[in-house]
Amino acid sequence: MSIVAEQRELRDDALNGLQLSTRLENLWRTPSGFFGALASVDHKVVGRRYIVTAFVFLLLGGVLAVLMRVQLAGPEKTFLSADKYDQIFTMHGSTMMFLFAVPVMEAFAVYLVPLMVGTRNIAFPRLNAFSYWMFLFGGCFLWISFMLNVGPDVGWFAYVPLSSLQYTPTKRPDVWAQMITFTEVAALAVSVEIVVTVFKLRAPGMTLDRIPLFVWAMLVTSFLVMFAMPSIMVASTSLILDRLVNTRFYDSSSGGHPLLWQHLFWFFGHPEVYIIFIPGTGMVSMILATFARRPVIGYPVVILSLIATGFLSFGLWVHHMFVTGLPQLGAGLFTASSMLIAVPSGLQIFCWLATLWDGRPVYRTPLLFVLGFIVIFVIGGLSGVMVASVPIDTQVHDTYFVVAHFHYVLIGGAVFPLIGAVYYWFPKIAGRMLSERLGRWHFWLAFVGFNVAFFPMHILGLIGMPRRVYTYTADMDWAHLNLLSSAGAAIFAISFALLLVNAIHSLRSGALAGDNPWDASTLEWATTSPPPPQNFDRIPIVKHRDPLWFDNESLPVVAGLSVERREVLMTSLAEAEPQVREASPEPSIWPLLTAIATTVFFIGSIFTPWAVLWGTPPMAVTLIGWFWPSGSKEDEE
Amino acid sequence: MPVRMRTALVPSATLPLAACAGRQSALDPQGLQSGEIFHTLSVFLIVAALVWIAVVIVLGLSMLRRKRAADQPLALHQPFERASGRVIFVLGLATLVIVLGLSIVSYAGQRTVFAKVENALTLKIIGHQWWWEVRYEDDSPARSFVTANEIRIPAGKPVKVELESADVIHSFWVPSLTGKMDLITGQKNELQFTAKNAGVYRGQCAEFCGLQHAHMAFAVLALPPDEFGRWRDHENESARDPADQLGRLGEQLFRARGCALCHSIRGTLAGGQLGPDLTHVGSRTTVAAGTLPMSPATLAAWIADPQHIKPGNYMPKMPLQSDELIAILHYLEQLK
Ligand code: HEM
Ligand SMILES: [Cu+2]
């Protein structure tokens, strides 16, 4: 034993190119076979699964959206009953927010951040695997409940007292509340991984002012998640306690208060929007730089805007509560602070416009989606400024104006960049290009369909249509605009079918991508497409913000990492100077088993408080398995 | 924001928007408060439209701009970088100024909308799943009465509604008169408004309150003040005794078949508290909280099968023979 330890282990500087790649590939590979795949801790494998799963939820949420639009296409339609409609709009909102928008952004980060910062794996890869399983199980749990007619039906914000046992005695709100806990566990885990990956695993030389903007955006987002999510966990856990063991957090007849729920919910819910939007802006910055053929102008301004947006987003939750009878002066102050967030958002847009102005744009599909993003998102931002005004909000709150507003923000601000990102990074992930022609069709149908679907909703709201109504009467004059909106939704939905066709077709027979098909500048393009299990044969050294553009010859690299055990290089926080070689965990089935045990615990606790007793031992066992010291391999987290 | 600017801007905004007037529209203000909100909204809309157009123009120009020769793969221009830094700074400042300006406009509007009014007629409105209880209270109990789903007010006079909820959160909203305000269990909110002219204004619950949220509407009838006075005096009276044999039978059946467990009719033995007070139900304009216009046919349809019209509402389908239904209907129609 001691002799072995004293021998100098084999390092990468002792091997030449091909030998090194094969060796590293064997070392970092996901084990073969079904169980091997379940045990994978490769951030790319997990990230791919995460992305695909989130898109499946987008598809499901989209189908629900279309069902709603069918029901609302004309007055007094009986396509859906009131009960089904309530479940459907709740499932749509919850699926889109908790199972699609936040996870998909984190999924992209799980895949891209380690590549962008030039390391071999994400920090805490087993936690990462666990996070994915929790997300998957939470999502399946919600959707299976829905199929069994126990889908939640009290809105994605589940206001008390409506969601209390007294007014909704079914299990539906319990399902909703536990689904929250599932997805929060997953989201918190990923944000911890991202923060540590960005702070400690960056390639040598990647100082803070050389970090790619998407990585910055994910860093800010991760902090938002860490500060916002506990609030909703407190809220939903208190709700479930009220429902299951008769506590009285929200019951005004025994000293609780329904508004407590709203404060807790929106203290999370407002930053939530930015948790979705900020990664979108990160994607925009990356795509824009590549296709404008120049780095984004005002790199420090963009970063400061991201950080400012993050901070401000916590000060705004009250603007969701202007009509709950708050003191007027306080509400007025929240107006000003809410509108203030237009300043950092505006600054970012000015930086992007300047970049386009000075660049030589190449109009490929990813850039089209970014241009569409600017046109749409600005409308959403401006209607946001309106909603922030107390008097205007008293009219438009809880109407279709707000539905229009937040779809302009969420779809314009996050889904458009995201789809651009899919076209942009698909070649890296799949090794093949998506069809440009289908991509353009997709863009134009999506752009037109989106606006036709959602613009009329602004007017509908102003002429009096409340949201969350399953029907309306013919004499309300809402029929024409609703029909138009439903037609737009159909076009929008069809445009997404094109993406599906495009992806399936390209996976089989798309043009091979090569390492860097767009001639982009950041590190994820410095390796093959798709990247090998070890990401990089040799860890690059970064000397510029855009290494692939300005390091005219090949990238300088680090030497000296072990090729006998999985190792990543840790660097210092600010200057990214190499500090230590750190073991990275081996594949393990325990994260999956732990997730199963946790799922049993969470679901059991809906039915009996005793689950807290019998549910914990399996969790303890699996956690012990997970963290069991495994001999000399030093692979614990 | 200076008043002059507001008056200058508003007419231009009003024209295209006024075409969108509907039965409950924020774009067709008929009250003092809704008018003020409409002004604020117009200012915001115009500023927003201008900003959006500016952004789109710059975006378009940057796409159309003739770019330098395409030989070099990267476009990098240090002087441009510095110049654009200054432009971005100035635009950021401009955004800040616009935002602060709009905040001031908003606050001015808010103060007017929520200004306390003296001598307002005060009503108490209690939200129920899925109907509205309306209480006209007076210092002398003899002049207090309860009605439902319909609010009559004097036109041109300020009205104050005190809002409470009997169950979940609802929201009181009559867009043509003023913005909304929530009704929350364990909390008392208030809202004030003045209808400028006599007329009928539709209102609707705006906060999701369960299964029949879509069918929780009401009517506000603004009457000329003396007519309002007469109505109030009349409404204050107990129900008249039925005038004929069939009506008297209806009254008996109303109690015998269980209707009175939930509904009250003042001046009779019917004293239920769970459903809307029916003392003068025959004079109301809608059935089932704004769901259907009031007529013998709709009233009959409702009583025959309330679950068909508003599935999930708390009025059960009562086991009535058709002749019993006719008698009860005949009785209710007389309750004017
Ligand atoms: C095909 C695209 C979409 C269509 C046609 C659509 C349509 C709708 C409609 C009609 C409603 C209103 C339901 C009501 O108030 O009765 C709604 C609600 C909502 N949508 Fe979408 N939507 C789409 C995509 C999205 C996306 C991508 C997201 C998020 C990223 C999203 C998030 C939400 C949320 C959070 C709600 C509120 C649910 C609630 O009130 O509880 N939607 N959507
Ligand atoms: Cu209601």
Image (cartoon, coloured by chain):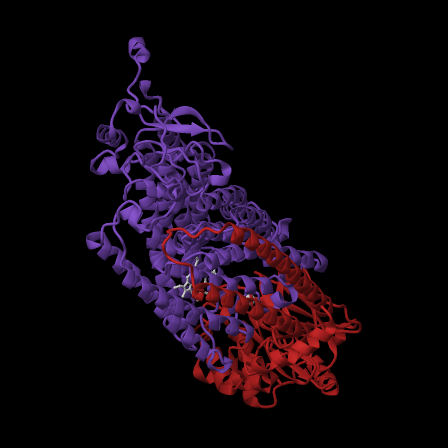
Chain colours: A purple, B red
Q: Is any atom of residue B32 visible in this view?
A: no
Q: Position of residue A584 (x, y in %)?
A: 36, 28
**For this view, does B198 lie left or right of residue A365?**
right
Q: Is residue A11 above or below residue B109?
A: above
Task: State the residue at coordinates (65%, 69%).
Answer: B125
Q: Position of residue A462 (x, y in %)?
A: 55, 73
Q: Quadrant of the N terminus of chain B?
A: bottom right
Q: Position of residue A241 (x, y in %)?
A: 51, 44
Dividing the picture into quarters, in which one does residue A359 lie?
bottom left
Of all residues, the one furthest to the bottom in this rendering is: B244
Q: Is residue B276 above or below residue A519?
A: below
**For this view, does A112 lie left or right of residue A408?**
left
Task: State the residue at coordinates (35%, 45%).
Answer: A137
Task: State the residue at coordinates (70%, 81%).
Answer: B196
Q: Nearer the viewer, residue A337 or A396?
A: A337
Dividing the picture into quarters, in which one does residue A94 lie?
bottom left
* Ligand 1: quadrant of the figure: bottom left
Of all residues, the one furthest to the top in this rendering is: A3
Q: Nearer the viewer, residue B318 or A137?
A: A137
Q: Nearer the viewer, residue B320 or A75?
A: A75
Q: Position of residue A558 (x, y in %)?
A: 36, 28
